[in-house]
Image: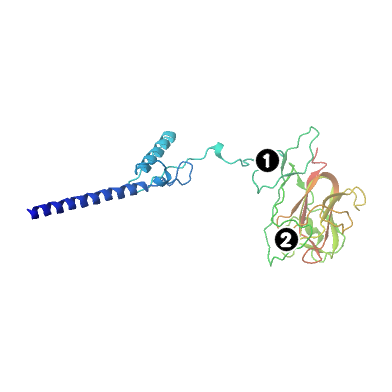
């Protein structure tokens, strides 16, 4: 009798133990389901659905219900069904394509750049500068960015620290210059004179020969210290831009750069200064508010603002590497009187 009771007790304990194991197994399986994560939701960011992130979810299978709801909403909105995973996988909800209205407000065409009232959103796009005054009817002419062929960058050597009181940041981008259509380089192959009749290196004609390369034999050296070069355009013309290249094979800035135009060959009368980086009036031509800059293969564009002149004179006072003055090329963009008819 005692043996029978003992056997019954042992059987009951075994049954209870087996039931506990089954219960724990079910709990473990439920927790595994609860770890299902939705890696992406329709806006593209991560969304993890776990009980700890879903307050009030009493059932351990709530994440699966949330997953089904997300899938149902996507299918209803997009018409594209979502393939649900197995209990061990993760569901991937397709990422919505952005609508035009959701895109950032960026410049998408040239008209927004041409419009001086347009807000520039892109920070790396410099504000435009108009070279042409408004027409008599109060509207701007048909303007386009001034462009030219940019020579190959040929920088070599060690970059040295450049110390000038009015030096602009090296990373500063030039402002695109908007000019009327149909301009020509009026300086091409024109006569060049200088404050020094004989250059130290090269010939003055290099300055207007159309070659902007910085290799040896392509530049003119004049000096030392304060000197100028002058281009005779042959006749008076309406000028909109002067594009100049000093020596750009090494990092250097030219000092007291001044650009003037006039119809007087001797620059004694009717002189108009369109650029003046002489901040302390060392050259005696007046104190300027423009900045010195480090020369690169992109040159420097000077706004001539539609003035009429025949002669263009460019001044400099050596550079931060030595006392000499150098020129590779100068372009003068404008319209001759015959072009304006």
- Residue drawn at x 39%, y 36% is 72
Along the viewing direction, whichever of 40 and 239 lies nearer the viewer: 40
In this rendering, position of residue 223 left or right of residue 268: left
* The residue positioned farthest toward the top in the image shown: 137
- Residue drawn at x 53%, y 37% is 99
| Numbered mark located on residue 248 in the image | 2
Q: CA distance from mark 2 to mark 1?
A: 34 Å
Query: Which is more N-terminal, label 1 or label 2?
Result: 1
**Colouring method of the image:** rainbow
In this rendering, position of residue 73 left or right of residue 16: right
Along the viewing direction, whichever of 36 and 184 lies nearer the viewer: 36
- Residue 325 in the image, given as x and y percentages of width and height: 81, 62
- Residue drawn at x 69%, y 47% is 126
- Evaluate whether residue 207 shows in this view: yes
Q: Nearer the viewer, mark 2 or mark 1?
A: 1
Along the viewing direction, whichever of 339 and 93 lies nearer the viewer: 93
Along the viewing direction, whichever of 22 and 242 lies nearer the viewer: 22
| Numbered mark located on residue 41 in the image | none
- Residue 227 in the image, given as x and y percentages of width and height: 85, 61
Quadrant position of residue 336: top right
Pointer 1 residue = 119
* The residue positioned farthest toward the right in the image shown: 268
In this rendering, position of residue 211 left or right of residue 40: right
Q: Secondary structure at mark 2?
A: loop
- Residue 224 in the image, given as x and y percentages of width and height: 84, 65
- Residue 163 in the image, given as x and y percentages of width and height: 76, 63
Quadrant position of residue 63: top left
- Residue drawn at x 41%, y 39% is 70
Q: Secondary structure at mark 1?
A: loop
């Amino acid at each position: 009798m005692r043996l029978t009771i003992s056997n019954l007790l042992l059987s009951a304990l075994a049954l209870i133990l087996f039931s506990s194991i089954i219960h724990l197994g079910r709990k473990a399986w439920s927790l595994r389901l609860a770890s299902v994560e939705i890696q992406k939701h329709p806006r593209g960011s991560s969304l993890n659905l776990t009980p700890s992130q879903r307050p009030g979810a009493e059932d351990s299978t709530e994440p699966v219900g949330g997953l089904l709801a997300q899938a149902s909403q996507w299918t209803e909105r997009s018409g594209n069904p979502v393939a649900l995973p197995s209990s061990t996988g993760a569901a991937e909800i397709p990422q919505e394509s952005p609508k035009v209205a959701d895109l950032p407000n960026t410049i998408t065409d040239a008209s927004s750049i041409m419009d001086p009232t347009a807000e520039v959103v892109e920070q790396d796009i410099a504000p435009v500068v108009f070279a042409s005054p408004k027409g008599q009817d109060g509207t701007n002419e048909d303007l386009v960015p001034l462009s030219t062929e940019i020579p190959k960058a040929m920088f070599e050597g060690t970059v040295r620290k450049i110390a000038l009181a009015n030096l602009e940041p090296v990373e500063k981008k030039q402002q695109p210059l908007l000019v009327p259509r149909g301009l020509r380089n009026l300086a091409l192959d024109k006569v060049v004179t200088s404050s020094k009749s004989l250059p130290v290196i090269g010939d003055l004609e290099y300055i207007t020969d159309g070659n902007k390369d910085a290799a040896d034999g392509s530049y003119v050296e004049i000096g030392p210290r304060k000197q100028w070069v002058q281009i005779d355009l042959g006749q008076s013309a309406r000028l909109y831009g002067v594009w100049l290249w000093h020596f750009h094979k090494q990092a250097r800035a030219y000092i007291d750069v001044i650009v003037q135009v006039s119809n007087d060959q001797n620059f004694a009368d009717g002189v108009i200064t369109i650029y003046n980086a002489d901040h302390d009036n060392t050259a005696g031509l007046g104190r300027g508010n423009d900045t010195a800059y480090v020369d690169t293969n992109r040159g420097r564009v000077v706004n001539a603002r539609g003035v009429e002149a025949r002669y263009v004179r460019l001044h400099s006072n050596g550079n931060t590497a030595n006392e000499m003055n150098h020129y590779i090329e100068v372009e003068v963009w404008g319209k001759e009187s015959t072009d304006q008819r």
